[in-house]
Image (spheres, rainbow, N blue to C red):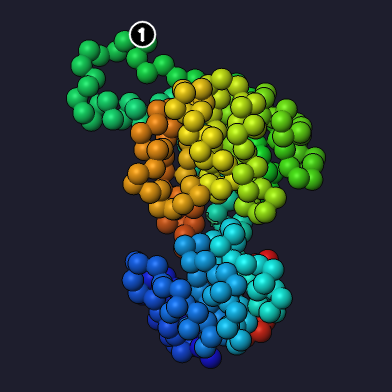
Amino acid sequence: MKIAVTFPIPEPAKALLSDLFDCRFWESEVPIPAGTLAEWLSEVEGVLTTLTCPLDQAALSGASHLKVISTVSVGVDHIDVDYAKSKNIAIGHTPGVLTDSTADLAIGLMLAVGRRLAEGDAMVRKGAWSDGWKPNLLLGTDLSQSTVGLVGMGPIGQAVAKRLAGFGCRVIAWNRSPKEIAGVEFTDLNTLLSSADIVSLHTALTDETRELIDRDRLSLMKDQAILINTARGAIVDERALADELAFGRLRAGLDVYSEEPLPLDSVFHSLPGCVLLPHVGSATERTRRAMFEMALANLISGVRGEPLQAEL
Ligand code: GLV
């Protein structure tokens, strides 16, 4: 049985797959070219991939033997899910195992933006901290006791809510279908945006959530409120967000962008009031290992025609 791997993977994973299957490994850090991807997909029964590799209709149309797409990610917005399903291709992903790491990072960004951690670090490193403790040096805002609005209350939103309880925050939330969660007040999206000191996004990117946080909705946010995005960049109208940051009206902690890597000429690089990370929500040793294990299990089961551990 043949499989393809569309991105460089660790040697032990390669050895395991090579023992089981006839494998094509894409070894380069440069993304696999569309033509090569389509050619490989036309030959294989399984593909191990990740979110940097779009599996759209063009890539999948010739994939006549493909039984399973296994992505090392919880998000599947890089895959044309409806099209894959119409071709009876199973889709495996990695929910659950990255919930805590991503929730931790969201809290980290709330603290980093509110308490101006990146500015403080830069000041010390460049020798600009010249006159010791000062009563008004780098004054920020507290996470403790603040009102935090969570957009999307799946497992990651719920894990963030749990952490916020420890900070004594009032937690309000919006979800497509309201839920009963102790300590969380559900509300409509516009009320959430206009009431929260911090808004944190935890929804998947779908046709419904693309630019859900558009210019009008951003304008509802309180002056100096903080937008945290560890979900997907395209959930926000980034141009409108950049305008709000440029005016100094809002602040933001961003781990994700509609175009990744963030282009070198992106306006975000020069904007004040924001902390920018390179899409590292799940980037801990333990979590990445767990994601890999789950994705390999999904791939192997899918190629064998067995149920996946985590199937979409
Ligand atoms: C990361 O963004 C993921 O979807 O796993």
Q: Nearer the viewer, residue 127 or 190?
A: 190
Residue under the point 65% across and 67% down: 81
Judge from the rendering whether residue 115 lies leftward or rightward of residue 127; answer left or right: right
Judge from the rendering whether residue 209 lies leftward or rightward of residue 287; answer left or right: right
Residue under the point 65% across and 26% down: 220
Q: Name the residue furthest top.
A: 135
Write down the residue under mark 1: 135
Within the image, what quadrant is residue 147 found in?
Answer: top right
Give the x, y percent position of residue 175.
Answer: 73, 42
State whether residue 249 appears in this view: yes
- Residue type (three-letter) at the residue carrying disc 1: Pro
Give the x, y percent position of residue 26.
Answer: 39, 76
Residue under the point 22% across and 22% down: 128
Q: Is residue 115 above or below residue 70?
A: above
Give the x, y percent position of residue 135.
Answer: 36, 8
Give the x, y percent position of residue 98.
Answer: 55, 54
Within the image, what quadrant is residue 64 found in?
Answer: bottom right
Residue under the point 37% across and 18% down: 138
Badge 1: residue crowd in 10 Å (few <14, some 14–19, many ≥20): few
